[in-house]
């Protein structure tokens, strides 16, 4: 990377160690954040994400290493200049008294106002814009102390935006928010990154959102940055399971989603599904704690993707190829071993393979159910 | 635009509150000049004030007794209220004030020591000496409260700790009074109850200078104070020099409460009640708007309470602290019930 490129970077950390007191919580951090880039910090609770953000904000002194912001060493940037460059949203909630939402946002103009802090027309316009963007214009006169957590979070975000930062640091910005507000929050951050060329560093607990919203993901665990890079390279099933200490097979990188662990033991039910018809059945069996097998599914069928996480046995055929006779035979053996078949495919829509498997079940005296509810109902009566 | 509308309403409320309080203050000020064992009409007393000090009995009553006392109650009431406002901001605690946190008692204890030492050696206590002594006492107590505050996480524990510190200081003061010689006891007893009586002009001048200077500094600090109200973290991220600001708040609030204790003794609850009346009156806690109003409400509160203390069972005079407690404590209880977040 040339010297010129380095000057353009919004945030550079080199060999950084952070922590309270003498013992570093995380060491050896190297970071490079470009303007317009959204960087997500992920990792288990207590891994030091908040401490890292506070150090990047200049609230804590680094224990080792250097931080530079837009080509300037962070320690050389004085309070007001820093406040015009970096804005923060932390998880601490101000304990206010008789302060409206708008009062809080107006406080964000601090680095721009005169010695008595009186707002001019430009400041008021910036406050209005931030209130509108954060979606809290209609509640601007409400008392901050009496707002919901989500409204407070938006208020504090507006307070950060009104500082007109070029670098925005956020600690768990999506906590306390419902799913709709989480999506709005991340969409808003992406828009600011894109339109204002703002560099954004956020710690996120929702890995599925991190995967979707971030350009660059930094994984922190046990005092080190264990991986970093683009989400598709970093957020593999193996990496996420290692990072959070999850059981194998919990994380689905295609959707960034997690599944609860599959029931253990020998399969008691065989599920005949395909083309998405099996997902509700798989989940119902998982909740009931019943181990099951399924097949014959095409790889990348959504049922197959899910079955890989939830089923004990998955009989799968490589996509775009006719179904192998051997797999059908294997499925027949498994059906006999289970002793129960649930067919999720609507009558009349079965393909040839499904008909073969149902015929096999009926011939060998295996109980056949047309829905998972019918099957679970028999268990309740028993 | 609607934003305009709500700002205009706020401005009108602010102006209205200032005007109402200013009128109340003038009325109470004139009333405290008129009221007393020698009855004077408002016109008479104002005439005597405008005429300047003269040799008549009425003029001497006004100039030597009532005027210094009225000014003292006004200035110290305002100062006490500001001190409470600063401490509430500092601790983010709605019921902090110098009395509850034990700072007044600490200052009182220091003055008691000083008074016994100075009077015992046959000298007199100058205003400067008593302020210096009170400041040392209040800063020392403030230091102790700060040490405790670092350990306790809840707002109510801080108050309990402050009350305990106050009790310790009062106990020490009472020991000192018990063992002091007769001459000192007379001085200590009357002063340690809390009263504006017997204010001398030299003391009034010192109080006015200190309180006016401190008020000016607080107004100048209103911008960082406003940011500090959001909490230390956000104040830092806005570029406030938090350590410096905290030290200034401690120094000014201690100086104000020292000044009050030195000249009037410990006065309870004004520091909590008056700032809250000001904040509720304008529906905001922005320092730039609240500071002058805080001063006014404190002045009105103390002037009024002093008038009640003098007149209610005249010629017997009540301690002003007893009157401020009667009016102030219910306000504090109401606040504790109202503030849902108080823990």
Image: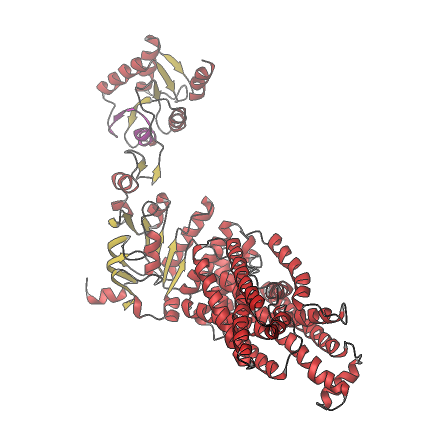
Quadrant of image for the N terminus of chain B: bottom right
In the drawing, does residue B149 fall left or right of residue A334? right
Q: Nearer the viewer, residue A184 or A80?
A: A80
Q: Is residue A373 left or right of residue B194?
A: left
Placement of A189 over or under A338, stated as above or below: below
Percent position (x, y) of residue A85?
37, 66
Q: Could you tell me residue B14's position as x and y percent?
A: 63, 69
| Residue at 56% over, 61% down | B100
Q: State how the image is colored.
A: secondary structure
Residue B316: x percent and y percent? Answer: 74, 70
Q: Nearer the viewer, residue B294 or B222?
A: B294
Q: Residue furthest left?
A: A2
Would residue A297 be seen by someone viewing this image from the given angle? yes
Q: Is residue B292 visible?
A: no
Quadrant of residue B215 within the rendered picture: bottom right
Q: Is residue A333 left or right of residue B225?
A: left
Q: Which of these two is toward me, B180 or A263?
A: B180
Count of numbered labels shown in the rendering: 0
Question: Is A318 part of what is drawn in magenta?
Answer: yes
Q: Residue at x 50, y 69 (%)?
A: B138
Residue A191 lies in the magenta stretch:
no
**Where on the picture, by quarter, is residue B192?**
bottom right
Q: Quadrant of residue A375?
A: top left
Question: On screen, A340 above or below B158?
Answer: above
Give the magenta range: A303-321
At which x and y percent is residue B204? Answer: 61, 81
Residue in front for this viewpoint, B262 or B175: B175
């Amino acid at each position: 990377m040339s010297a010129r490129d380095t000057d353009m970077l919004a945030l550079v950390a080199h060999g950084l160690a952070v922590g309270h007191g003498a013992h570093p919580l995380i060491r050896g951090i190297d970071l490079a954040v470009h303007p317009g880039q959204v960087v997500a910090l992920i990792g288990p609770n207590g891994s030091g994400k908040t401490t890292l953000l506070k150090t990047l904000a200049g609230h804590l002194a680094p224990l080792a290493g250097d931080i530079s912001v837009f080509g300037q060493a962070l320690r050389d940037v004085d309070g007001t200049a820093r406040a015009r460059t970096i804005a923060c949203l932390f998880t601490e909630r101000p304990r206010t008294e008789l302060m409206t939402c708008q009062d809080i946002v107006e406080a964000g103009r601090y680095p721009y106002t005169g010695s008595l802090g009186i707002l001019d027309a430009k400041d008021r316009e910036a406050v209005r814009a931030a209130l509108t963007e954060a979606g809290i214009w209609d509640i601007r006169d409400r008392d901050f102390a009496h707002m919901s957590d989500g409204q407070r979070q938006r208020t504090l975000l507006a307070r950060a935006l009104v500082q007109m930062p070029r670098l925005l640091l956020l600690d768990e910005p999506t906590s306390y928010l419902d799913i709709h507000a989480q999506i709005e929050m991340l969409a808003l951050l992406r828009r600011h990154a894109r339109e204002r060329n703002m560099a954004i560093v956020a710690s996120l607990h929702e890995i599925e959102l991190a995967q979707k919203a971030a350009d660059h993901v930094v994984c922190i665990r046990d005092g080190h940055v264990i991986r970093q890079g683009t989400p598709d390279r970093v957020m593999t099933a193996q990496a996420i399971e290692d990072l959070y200490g999850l059981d194998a097979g919990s994380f689905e990188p295609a959707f960034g989603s997690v599944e609860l662990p599959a029931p253990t033991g020998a399969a008691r039910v065989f599920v005949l599904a395909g083309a998405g018809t099996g997902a509700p059945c798989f989940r119902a069996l998982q909740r009931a704690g019943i181990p099951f097998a399924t097949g014959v599914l095409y790889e990348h069928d959504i049922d197959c993707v899910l079955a890989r996480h939830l089923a004990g046995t998955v009989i799968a055929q490589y996509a775009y190829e006719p179904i192998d006779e051997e797999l059908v035979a294997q499925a027949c053996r498994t059906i006999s071993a289970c002793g129960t078949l649930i067919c999720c495919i609507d009558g009349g829509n079965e393909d040839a393979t499904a008909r073969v498997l149902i015929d096999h079940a009926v011939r060998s005296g295996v109980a056949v159910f047309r829905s998972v509810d019918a099957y679970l109902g028999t268990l309740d009566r028993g | 635009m609607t934003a305009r509308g709500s700002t205009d309403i706020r401005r009108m409320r602010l102006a209205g509150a200032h005007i109402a309080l200013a009128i109340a203050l003038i009325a109470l000020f004139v009333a405290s000049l008129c009221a007393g064992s020698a009855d004077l009409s408002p016109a008479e007393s104002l005439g005597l004030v405008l005429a300047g000090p003269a040799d008549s009995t009425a003029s001497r009553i006004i100039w030597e007794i009532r005027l210094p006392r009225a000014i003292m109650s006004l200035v110290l009431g305002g100062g006490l209220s500001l001190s409470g406002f600063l401490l509430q901001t500092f601790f983010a605690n709605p019921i902090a004030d110098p009395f509850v946190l034990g700072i007044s008692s600490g200052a009182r204890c220091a003055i008691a020591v000083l008074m016994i030492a100075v009077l015992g050696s046959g000298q007199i206590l100058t205003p400067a000496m008593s302020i210096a002594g009170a400041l040392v006492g209040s800063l020392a107590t403030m230091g102790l409260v700060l040490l405790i505050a670092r350990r306790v996480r809840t707002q109510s524990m801080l108050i309990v700790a402050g009350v305990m510190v106050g009790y310790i200081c009062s106990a020490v003061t009472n020991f000192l009074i018990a063992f002091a010689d007769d001459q000192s006891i007379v001085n200590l007893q009357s002063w340690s109850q809390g009263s504006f009586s017997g204010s001398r002009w030299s003391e009034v001048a010192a109080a006015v200078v200190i309180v006016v200077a401190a008020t000016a500094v607080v107004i100048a600090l209103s911008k960082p104070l406003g940011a500090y109200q959001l909490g230390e973290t956000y104040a830092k991220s806005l570029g406030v020099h938090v350590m410096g600001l905290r030290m200034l708040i401690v120094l000014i609030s201690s100086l104000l409460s020292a000044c009050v204790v030195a000249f009037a003794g410990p006065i309870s609850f004004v520091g909590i009640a008056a700032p809250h009346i000001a904040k509720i009156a304008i529906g905001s806690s922005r320092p730039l708007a609240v500071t002058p109003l805080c001063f006014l409400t404190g002045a009105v509160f103390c002037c009024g309470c002093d008038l009640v203390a003098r007149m209610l069972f005249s010629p017997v005079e009540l301690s002003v602290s007893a009157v401020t407690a009667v009016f102030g404590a219910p306000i504090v209880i109401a606040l504790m019930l109202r503030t849902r977040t108080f823990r």
